[in-house]
Amino acid sequence: MGDGGSSILGVPRPRLAPPPCPNPPAPRPRGEGVGGAAPGGPAKAKLVLLGLLYLVQGMPYGLQSGLLPVYLRSRGLSLTRIGLTKVLYLPWLLKVAWAPLVDQRGSKRAWLALSTVALAGTWAACAALPPETHFGPLAGALLLMNLCASVQDVAVDGLAVRLLAPHEVGLGNTVQVVGYKLGSLLAGGGLLTVVHLLGWGPLFTLLALAYLAAAGAAWRAPPLRPDPGAPAAAPRCPRPAPPSPSHLLRALLEVTGTLWTAGFVLLYKLGEQGASGIFPLFLLDRGMSARELGLWNGIVAVGFSITGSSLAGVFLAKHRQPLLVLRPLLLLRLGGLVFQSALLFTFDGSKAFFRGAAVLSICLQHFVGGLVTTLTFSLMMHCSQRADEAIQATHYSFLATLELVGKLLLSTVAGGLVDRAGPEPCFGLFLALSLAAVLYLDRAPGSLG
């Protein structure tokens, strides 16, 4: 990848000082398959593979963010207890701890296949654990599901960072976000609308079989298979000893733009996630049914989110400068949140006008959120591509972990805040945090583009 001394963007990389190698392997041009696939031709295959993997990766999130909260609220659980189910996402916060293992031991192909097969097993376990009677064991299965998905995520992110050429990053991030959201849509709003028809057990059994098929597809994917016609590989250097945690953290933070990017990904979703987690439950309490919310919030709104992500990808494919449009989009998101906050004071669930206004506010929120998320993930990938190849997946996982912390930080406690203070003061906090993201963007380093 490149000459090993500077990034593809011409920015020096922090080195982990590997031992000298007398016969270094020839560098592989960025954009070639891991197994030596020819450049240019495999572009579509790479994007299809990444889309499939991110789709199956998004389904556990959709299950826990779309189906479970509405299902549990309809069964009378408090917002505080529903918010505490976010603890099940703990493996995602810890994935940076095992990212070096996935980065440096074994092949991405093996990690992807094994983690996807393990995910199939967790879906099969969920099939036997309906939440009405087995919520405790189901929570354990979901925790294990998140562990397997987080391992898969590290492998897929590392694959994306290595496979995508600079001009493919915009499309690659669009595939990433759209695939993930399609998975979230299928497992969130989709399951919420059909679970009463198929039943809990049969539906989750079908999902387990789908994951087994995805594991087989990933194992046979051309971008990951060794090329039998490729020249014999040069002798490899001995693997250096894994860096100490302090050394690794220092190497991650020394990558150009990392500190600002880390602060932004922690902040940019705080207000949006708080509002998007509470507002649908507010509508449920005010008379909208779980099936209505499954349709509008779980399917239609996510469709708007996917549309926003796709438009961001089109923009990035032409301009590759996400910072140009992030500020106006963050201001538009702030305006949408003001509109949603006003509905808290005026909403009347018996009138079609207010129900339509609520759905409109949710769709606008998801559409702008899709735009902002794709642009932000492109910033993250541009930043990670400046890192040494040996730590690129770890660097991206580090940023992605912080991004998840930002999403969960407020959404975990928002239910408790609403139970104690009411929704109106909490939405004031969400507005303030969304404004803070706009102001923080003004401090962005110009090198990020």
Image (cartoon, rainbow, N blue to C red):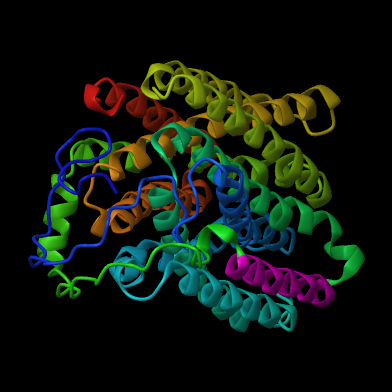
Note whether residue 232 is visible: yes
Quadrant location of the C terminus in the rendered image: top left
Residue 144 screen position, x and y as percent: 52, 77
Residue 143 screen position, x and y as percent: 51, 74
Residue 423 position by quadrant:
top right
Q: Observer-nearest residue: 333 or 353?
A: 333
Is 178 situated left or right of 194 in this image?
left
Which residue of the protein is positioned furthest toward the right in this rendering? 197
Q: In the rendered view, would you say 231 is above or below 385?
A: below
213 in the magenta segment: yes
Q: Observer-nearest residue: 385 or 149?
A: 385
Q: In the rendered view, would you say 149 is above or below 132?
A: above
- Chain part drawn in magenta: 200-220
Is 430 situated left or right of 96 in this image?
right
Q: Residue at x 44, y 31 (%)?
A: 167
Q: Residue at x 39, y 57 (%)?
A: 158
* Main SS class of the magenta portion in the image: helix
Residue 442 screen position, x and y as percent: 27, 20
Residue 41 screen position, x and y as percent: 57, 43
Is 48 situated left or right of 446 in this image?
right
Note whether residue 427 is visible: no
Q: Residue at x 13, y 46 (%)?
A: 254
Q: In the rendered view, would you say 212 is above or below 169?
A: below
Residue 76 position by quadrant:
bottom right
371 in the magenta segment: no
Q: Observer-nearest residue: 65 or 3?
A: 3
Q: Observer-nearest residue: 320 or 339?
A: 320
